[in-house]
Amino acid sequence: MKLSTVCLSLLLLMLTVSPGCIGGDDVEKAETIPSFTVIADDNETYSSENLLGTPYILHFSASWCSQCRPTIHAVDAQLSEHMYIIVSTDAADSTKLSDWHQQVNESKEGSTVDSPFSVNADLSSTLGINNTPTLILVGSNGEMLDRHLGPMTENSAIDEFWSQAV
């Protein structure tokens, strides 16, 4: 009986000091957002460099994505005081950003989206964005904190997503 107690104690001691177990240090370092620059329909330039120090959401969408529109309205309304940038995955959208923005505004009566609309197909490709909507939460230090695939329209889900950045 005494031998089994000693063996069990040794086993527990080894588990507490082994990396990846209790007391170990296996925290993964978050990946930094790749360098990007977009000129949005508000004629402002947004880049990974000039956004350092500010948490933000990149919403990968496209003008043809009808299920993206409710997410755009919901996130813009819920996080109106925070940086939220809509980024098209379709290079063809670059010639019609203002039209797309207007169509989104007209898709929900009484709701105006003030967030900037932009295009960066290269960034979406680099990040492996294959579906829209995809939202990426970027922390103030430029690290990608979370990725959400699919619509996000519930205020509680938007708040929970954003809360990781603060």
Image: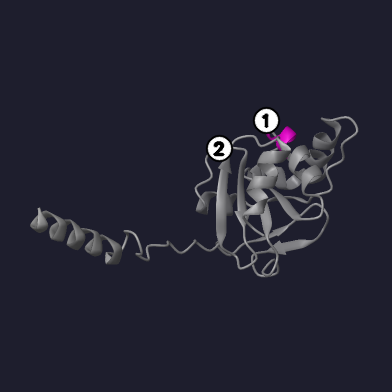
Kind of residue indicated by mark 2: Asn
- The reply to whether callout 1 and callout 2 are in contact (CB within 8 Å) is no
Residue 67 bears which disc, if any?
A: 1
Residue toward you, 67 or 56: 56
Give the quarter of the figure containing the C terminus: bottom right
Q: Position of residue 54 (x, y in %)?
A: 70, 65
Q: Is residue 90 visible?
A: yes
The picture quadrant where one finds residue 141 is bottom right
Circle 2 sits on which residue? Answer: 131
Identify the residue at image location x=56%, y=51%: 146
Tell me if 109 is positioned left or right of 17 in this view.
Answer: right
Of 9 and 132, nearer the camera is 9
Reading the chain from its start, which is encountered first: label 1 or label 2? 1
Q: Dot 1, crowdedness within 10 Å: few (<14), some or many (≥20)?
A: some
Q: How far apart are the two marked residues, 1 and 2, measured between alpha carbons?
A: 11 Å
- Taking the spot 62% from the left edge, 58% from the top edge, the residue there is 138
Q: Secondary structure at mark 2?
A: loop
Residue at image position (69%, 69%) is: 53
Image spot of residue 140 (x, y percent): 65, 65
Q: Give the amino acid at mark 1.
A: Gln
Q: Is residue 78 left or right of residue 159?
A: right
Q: Position of residue 24 (x, y in %)?
A: 34, 64
